[in-house]
Amino acid sequence: NAGVTQTPKFRVLKTGQSMTLLCAQDMNHEYMYWYRQDPGMGLRLIHYSVGEGTTAKGEVPDGYNVSRLKKQNFLLGLESAAPSQTSVYFCASGGLAGDTQYFGPGTRLTVL
Amino acid sequence: AQSVAQPEDQVNVAEGNPLTVKCTYSVSGNPYLFWYVQYPNRGLQFLLKYITGDNLVKGSYGFEAEFNKSQTSFHLKKPSALVSDSALYFCAVRDLDTGRRALTFGSGTRLQVQP
């Protein structure tokens, strides 16, 4: 099992450009999450999904959109990137029992 | 609203000595509590969790944590630290009674174990 994978690992964007981050999990988990990690702030929840075809806002959703067309994939989109979105982005998935979340390796995004 | 506080940005300990990384939480209902570890340039790895039952929870790599409801704390401990334990540690909480499954994370504590 690969667990949770994220694509790409690194990306540099210019202000105003768009991109999509892909998260895939092979554990048949219902729940998937996108977080951003910034120094001294821990992880903050951007959006999450409780099942295929559903999405919900987290703490810091502005400037991001998500889609969960397939159970195993959760996409995070930036329509018009801003320097404030420079961060490390983590995807996680979790099942129904025990709520343990399993994390991907992260995507380091720099917006110039 | 649920929240987590990790009062120490960094903890320094000598190899072989016991270590404690502190965590306090706030929820309106009953908590699920978690500890994760992050090594440089890696994702978060699950260490242990408290859901119910015994207040002392044992996890991976010799770590354990004690749930204290009256003090709303969930401190991470290890009897004998290793240099390889040096990493960033995150405490997280979920409020059982809200139905919201997302976790709230603390700001992290960097553990430095000196040889």
Image: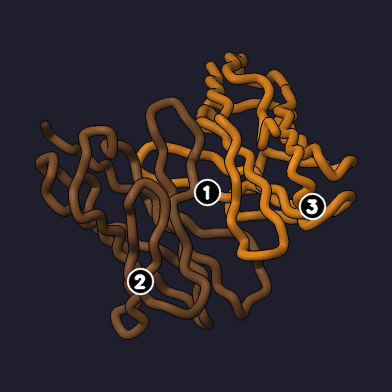
Dot 1 lies on which element?
A: strand
The mark lying in front, picked from 2 and 3, is 2
* Residue wearing tag 2: B56
Dot 2 lies on which element?
A: strand
Q: On screen, A72 above or below B68?
A: above
In the rendered structure, the colour chosen for chain B is brown
Question: Of the residues shown, which amino acid type is indicated by label 3?
Answer: Thr
Query: What's the CA distance linking mark 2 and mark 3?
Result: 35 Å
Q: Which chain is in orange here?
A: A
The dot on residue A44 is 1
Q: Nearer the viewer, residue B8 or B115?
A: B115
Q: Nearer the viewer, residue A8 or A19?
A: A8
Q: Is residue A40 left or right of residue B44?
A: left
Q: On screen, B26 above or below B6?
A: below
Q: Residue at x 58, y 14 (%)?
A: A12
The dot on residue B107 is none
Query: What's the CA distance linking mark 1 and mark 2?
Result: 28 Å
Question: Of the residues shown, which amino acid type is indicated by label 2?
Answer: Leu
Query: What's the CA distance linking mark 1 and mark 3?
Result: 16 Å
